[in-house]
């Protein structure tokens, strides 16, 4: 499983790189704080694969990196090869990039 750090994600965002960010947290979590990714909760990830790109990098994130790792494995089983898990999730983003973001 490929992983990227929050610093790498910040650089991708800052550089305007063409990638897709998928947030697999529940809707209420996403409403509390998000990094402008597309919200597809883990429970529906295999139902909504049509929303996930196969031809550009896709970063999958959650609160801590555990649910996103599960989602990544499920999608890889469906043939995806362009995925990366965000290490530490939004908790790491809050600790290392933006201390003002709300997390629980």
Image (cartoon, rainbow, N blue to C red):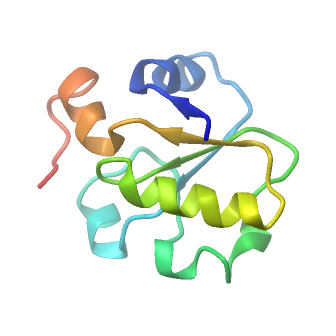
Residue at the far right in the pictured view? 55
Q: Is residue 98 left or right of residue 61?
A: left
In the depicted view, which residue is nearer to us: 37 or 81? 81
User: Where the C terminus falls, by quadrant?
Assistant: bottom left
User: Where the N terminus falls, by quadrant?
Assistant: top right
Residue 38: image location, x then y, percent: 55, 59
In the depicted view, which residue is nearer to us: 67 or 100? 67
Q: Residue at left 66%, top 77%?
A: 46
Q: Is residue 18 left or right of residue 71?
A: right
Q: Residue at left 69%, top 25%?
A: 17
In the depicted view, which residue is nearer to us: 4 or 98? 4
Can you say whether 82 is above or below 80 in the image?
Answer: above
Can you say whether 34 is above or below 40 in the image?
Answer: above
- Quadrant assignment, res 7: top left
Q: Residue at left 30%, top 32%?
A: 93
Residue 8: image location, x then y, percent: 51, 20
Residue 97: image location, x then y, percent: 28, 22
Q: Residue at left 61%, top 59%?
A: 73
Residue 86: image location, x then y, percent: 46, 39
In the depicted view, which residue is nearer to us: 75 or 41? 75
Residue at the far left in the pictured view? 104
- Quadrant assignment, res 3: top right
Q: Is residue 44 left or right of residue 66?
A: right
């Amino acid at each position: 499983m490929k992983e990227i750090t929050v610093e790498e994600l910040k650089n991708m965002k800052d550089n305007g790189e063409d990638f897709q960010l998928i947030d697999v947290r529940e809707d209420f979590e996403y409403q509390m704080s998000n990094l402008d990714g597309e919200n597809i909760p883990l429970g529906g990830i295999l139902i909504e694969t049509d929303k996930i790109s196969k031809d550009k990098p896709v970063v999958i994130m959650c609160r801590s990196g555990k649910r996103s790792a599960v989602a990544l494995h499920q999608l890889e089983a469906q043939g995806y090869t362009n995925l990366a898990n965000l290490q530490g999730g939004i908790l790491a983003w809050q600790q290392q990039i933006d201390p003002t973001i709300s997390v629980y």
